[in-house]
Image (spheres, rainbow, N blue to C red):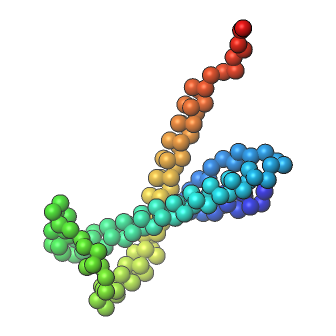
């Protein structure tokens, strides 16, 4: 069951919870099914982590520009404003340098940890909600009743 421990450690390393392993010894299909389910969940977890990091970076750049007096942030915040994907393609040398500065000056100096905290709070909330739902489901199950014929 070393692979189960490694899988749980991988989840924990990104601030996630793995599901409870519900298999019995001697049943080789149980661990395989559990690992397969966890692998599928891990892909979803990594995608959501990427989304949070992208959001944190975009918000960070917008905050910096706003604090430097850039009025474009207010314009882009309007509901009718759009951010076409095409505009993000082929960045100028200056835009690439700003991205690099953001990474070295902000992301490496606390931004990554800030995003990790957001991720962990989000994952804990989801995990706790699942546990509450599971407990409610279990309490709603009828106790073993003996039928009278």
Q: Residue furthest bottom?
A: 93
Q: Pick whichever, 21 or 56, lies toward us.
A: 21
Across and down, in percent, residue 17 comes to 59, 53
Measuring 61% from the left and 26% from the top, which residue is drawn there? 141
Can residue 91 be seen in this snapshot? Answer: yes
Residue sitting nearer the eye, 58 or 35: 35
Would residue 58 be found to the left or right of residue 67 on screen? right
Residue 87 quadrant: bottom left
Above or below residue 74? Residue 104 is below
In this view of the protein, which residue sits in the foreground, 103 or 46? 46
Q: Residue at x 39, y 69 (%)?
A: 54
- Residue 43 vertical position relative to residue 24 in the rendered view, above or below: below
- Give the percent coordinates (x, y) of residue 33: 69, 53
Residue farthest to the top, as pictured: 149
Q: Quadrant of the N terminus?
A: bottom right
The quarter of the picture where residue 66 lies is: bottom left
Q: Nearer the viewer, residue 147 or 103?
A: 147
Residue sitting at 41 percent across and 79 percent down?
103
Q: Please name the residue shown 65% across and 58% down the image.
A: 36
Q: Is residue 134 left or right of residue 58?
A: right
**Is 133 situated above or below 107?**
above
């Amino acid at each position: 069951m070393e692979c189960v421990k490694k899988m749980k450690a991988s989840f924990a390393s990104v601030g996630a919870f793995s599901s409870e392993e519900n298999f019995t010894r001697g049943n080789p299909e149980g661990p395989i099914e559990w690992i397969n389910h966890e692998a599928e969940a891990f892909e979803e977890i990594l995608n959501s982590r990427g989304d949070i990091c992208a959001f944190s970076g975009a918000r960070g750049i917008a905050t910096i520009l706003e604090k430097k007096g850039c009025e474009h942030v207010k314009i882009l915040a309007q509901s009718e404003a759009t951010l076409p994907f095409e505009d993000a393609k082929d960045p100028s040398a200056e835009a690439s340098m700003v991205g690099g500065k953001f990474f070295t000056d902000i992301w490496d100096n606390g931004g990554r940890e800030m995003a990790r905290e957001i991720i962990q709070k989000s994952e804990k909330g989801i995990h706790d909600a699942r546990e509450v739902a599971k407990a409610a489901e279990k309490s709603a199950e009828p106790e073993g009743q003996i039928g009278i014929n």
